[in-house]
Amino acid sequence: MAAISSLRALAATALPLLTIAAAQVQAAAIDAEAVREALMKNTGLKAESVQPSPIPGLWEVFIQDRLFYVDDKVGYVFSGSIIDTKTKTNQTQERLREFARENWSKWPRQDAVKQVFGKGQREVIVFSDANCTYCRSMERVFETVGNLTVWTFITPLIRGEQNNYEIVCAKDPSKAWADWMRRGITPPAAPQNCDSSVLTRNLKLAGRYSIGGAPTFFFPTGDRMTGAVSAEQFEGILAEQPTNGS
């Protein structure tokens, strides 16, 4: 029922979209490369992925991990959800999750702090801030659930670089992070001329994914979650994730 309600709410924009698409379907086959080139020519944007959408005459294009739809000649660019009335599913959300799964290995893990709890067979990516109370509570959850590898992108989302700067500048950022977040040990003073550019890169990455709060989690299944949960709830989410080697 929720999907049908959403469909009705979108009807005012969806119907013109379909009319435009139908009017612009070409008799000759249009390939993905032609759409990619037209997108660059008309918008100056580079697509990470181009393939036909569920609607004939429309193509889906991923630009900086965001999903848009275009017509064959890229005369129009659309954003929003495509809902399948037969299956009552949001095709756009399903495709976003699929794309995230396909690109799980492409996260820039070199800019993250790695922590391994137990065997570390399960994996999660999280954007955290050293000044975030909810992030601190999730560190205890990680310890409780165990068998987990956590890639933490330290991102100054709350009070600027305070504490975040000292941690990324520490000799062992992973230890400094764990000491501060789980044991309350103040990070050591940062050395002069420390290269803290990782904080800028992580902020840029957070902007790419429209992250405005911490902690924000990403999972191998393509799911995303913002906020803190109990160990029991987090274990339930992890139970749906693949393990390393599976």
Image: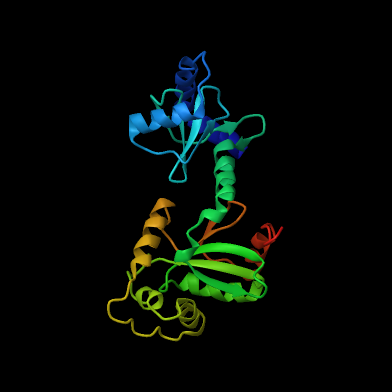
Tell which residue pokes out farthest to the right in this image. Answer: 246
Q: Is residue 167 above or below residue 15?
A: below
Relative to 221, say whether 47 is above or below: above
Residue lying farthest to the left in this orientation: 193
Q: Does 155 sit above or below residue 212?
A: below
Residue 196 in which image quadrant: bottom left
Furthest-top residue in this view: 27
Q: Position of residue 4 (x, y in %)?
A: 59, 33
Q: Nearer the viewer, residue 34 or 21?
A: 34
Which quadrant of the structure image shows residue 243? bottom right
Residue at 34% x, 84% y is 189
Q: Residue at x 64, y 60 (%)?
A: 237
Q: Nearer the viewer, residue 153 or 160?
A: 153
- Quadrant of image for the C terminus: bottom right
Q: Nearer the viewer, residue 47 or 130?
A: 47
**Residue 85 in the image: x percent, y percent?**
62, 29
Query: Is 217 on the left-hand or right-hand side of 240?
Result: left
Percent of width and height locating residue 225: 54, 57
47 lies left or right of 1:
left
Give the quadrant of the N terminus. top right
Task: Give how far across and how far down residue 75 sits, in percent.
Answer: 38, 24
Q: Is residue 15 left or right of residue 164?
A: right
